[in-house]
Image (cartoon, rainbow, N blue to C red):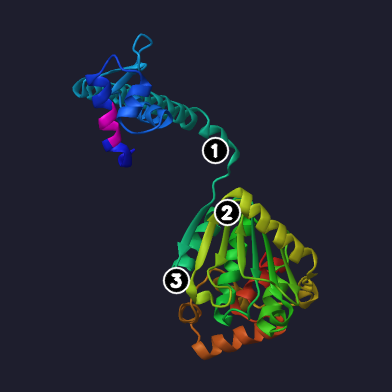
Amino acid sequence: MEGNSDARREIYGLISRNPGWSLEDIATEARCSRAEAEQLCDELSLLGLLTPASDSPSGYVTVAPEAALIRLFSAEERQTAAHLQLVTKIRSSISTLVRDYSRLAEERRDSVEVQILPDPTLVNAFLEDAGSAARVRMRSMHPGGPPPEELIDDMLLRDKEMESRGIRVEALYLRRTAEVPFMAGYLADAVRPGREARTADYLPLRMILFDDDLAVLPIDPEDSRQGAVAVHGKTLVRSLHALYDYCWYNATPSPPLQSCRTVGLVLDSQELVIVRMLADGVKDEVIARRLGISSRTLSRSISGLMERLGAQTRFQTALRIAESGLLG
């Protein structure tokens, strides 16, 4: 339209000044064809400057530019108002969808929460709390080497505490780990009603599962120092239990502790006191002071008991004697 502005002005002026002229007269005066004149009139009509009129020889009457401008603004305002009404309806529909229908999708969605535990200290504290809060079972998978030997008594105490609460405990270890003497002793002691340990040649990753809604996994399976993630949510934990089941059923059960090691074992009165205090967690120096013996004599007595029972730790010794019924 921009390129025809002069031509449009000439056509508009001819129609305005010569209302009795036909479209052919106007085209002749403007030195253009009738078709070109009709095209220019159509463009003037779109601008609101011409209005079709059947009683006019040219077929059009002119509209004052001021009136045409007002009409254009009015038309634009009507279109804007209609658009705003449409936008309001769309917003109302969106609000209805969000309010009334999004809840339906949420009802089908099981939320999963991931908690980052960035260092081993936080991981250990979290595992301690999770173990205390466990309701039904705890399952653990250990693909690495054995834990430090000094932690064995703590592990036995934890297992004993869970057993007292009726928590089922299952543990998977690498076969080569189970061949380490102190681990072999621990695994033998770990086999009790409600507790079971198995070994496998390969385990995919370190994993601890509490009940059906909590899993603790390493951030980096190759480096446990990077911390762990705690996954809360039944749907994902259910899948991790399925992975654990696969490893569990392909693993070898650890042999239970042979009770014959305590058959015929006789403890004198001093040994009975030592074992009872060991089971209660009393420190060596306190035991020696209460019995009125030297620390060296106490160490020899404990070492002798451990050797007779094939135990690897002092608490393990007390546990085996207590479970044999020798303490009465």
Please tell me whether the stretch drawn in magenta is mainly helix, strand or loop.
helix
Q: Dots 3 and 2: beta carbons under 8 Å? A: no
Position of residue 23 relative to residue 257, above or below, is: above
Inter-mark Cα distance, 1 to 3: 33 Å
For image coordinates 47% across by 58% down, the residue present is 115
For image coordinates 62% across by 86% down, the residue present is 303
Q: Dots 1 and 2: beta carbons under 8 Å? A: no
Q: Nearer the viewer, residue 295 or 111?
A: 111
Residue holding disc 1: 106
Q: Which mark is residue 134?
A: 2
Q: Nearer the viewer, residue 264 or 28?
A: 28
Q: Which mark is residue 135?
A: none
The local secondary structure at tag 2 comes to: loop
Ranked by sequence position, the earlier of labels 1 and 3 is: 1
The local secondary structure at tag 1 comes to: helix
Looking at the picture, how far across and down is residue 125, in whole percent?
Answer: 46, 65
Q: Nearer the viewer, mark 1 or mark 3?
A: 1
The local secondary structure at tag 3 comes to: loop
> Is 183 a magenta residue?
no
Q: Label 2 is placed on what type of residue?
A: Ala
For image coordinates 29% across by 35% down, the residue present is 7
Magenta span: 7-11
Which quadrant of the figure has residue 24?
top left
Looking at the picture, how far across and down is residue 32, in whole percent?
Answer: 36, 33
Inter-mark Cα distance, 3 to 2: 22 Å
Residue holding disc 3: 119
Quadrant containing the N terminus is top left
Residue 96 lies left or right of residue 270; in this view the side is left
> Is 9 a magenta residue?
yes
Q: Nearer the viewer, mark 3 or mark 2?
A: 3
